[in-house]
Image: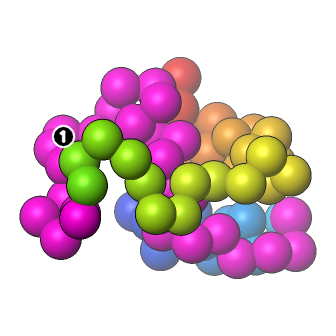
Amino acid sequence: MPTYKEIQDYVRVTRSFVPKTCWIANILAEHGLTKRVAANRTNPDSRMHPCPAAKREALTAAMQELGALP
C-alpha cells in the first residue's frame, strides 16, 4: 500500500492538485481500509475536513491506479 506522501506526490503530478491527508483518510475509511480512528480527532462520528465532492472522483481514481484501493 502506498504511503499518504506517495499518494499526494502522484496526485500532484497527474491531477494538478495536492490532496490533504484527511481527504485520503476519508476515502480509505469509506472503503473500510483504515485501522483506527485518529487519536487527535475531536468527534469520532464526524470529520472536520471530508474530501470535497469536486476532488473525490479524481482522488479515488488516482488511489486505484496506485493500488491503494481495490
Q: Residue drawn 40% across and 37% down?
A: 29
Query: Is 48 on the left-hand or right-hand side of 11?
Result: left
User: x, y percentage for residue 34?
Assistant: 28, 40
Amino acid of disc 1? Lys
Q: Which residues are magenta?
A: 15-42
Q: Is residue 49 visible?
A: yes
Query: According to the image, what is the colour scheme of the structure?
Result: rainbow
Q: Residue drawn 53% across and 23% down?
A: 70
Q: Which residue bears the numbered disc 1?
A: 35
Q: Is residue 15 above or below residue 5?
A: above
- Density class for disc 1 (Cα within 10 Å; few <14, some 14-19, many ≥20) is few
Q: Is residue 8 above or below residue 24?
A: below
Q: Nearer the viewer, residue 64 or 41?
A: 41
Helix, strand or loop: magenta stretch: loop
Q: Secondary structure at mark 1?
A: loop
User: x, y percentage for residue 1?
Assistant: 38, 46
Q: Nearer the viewer, residue 48 or 7?
A: 48
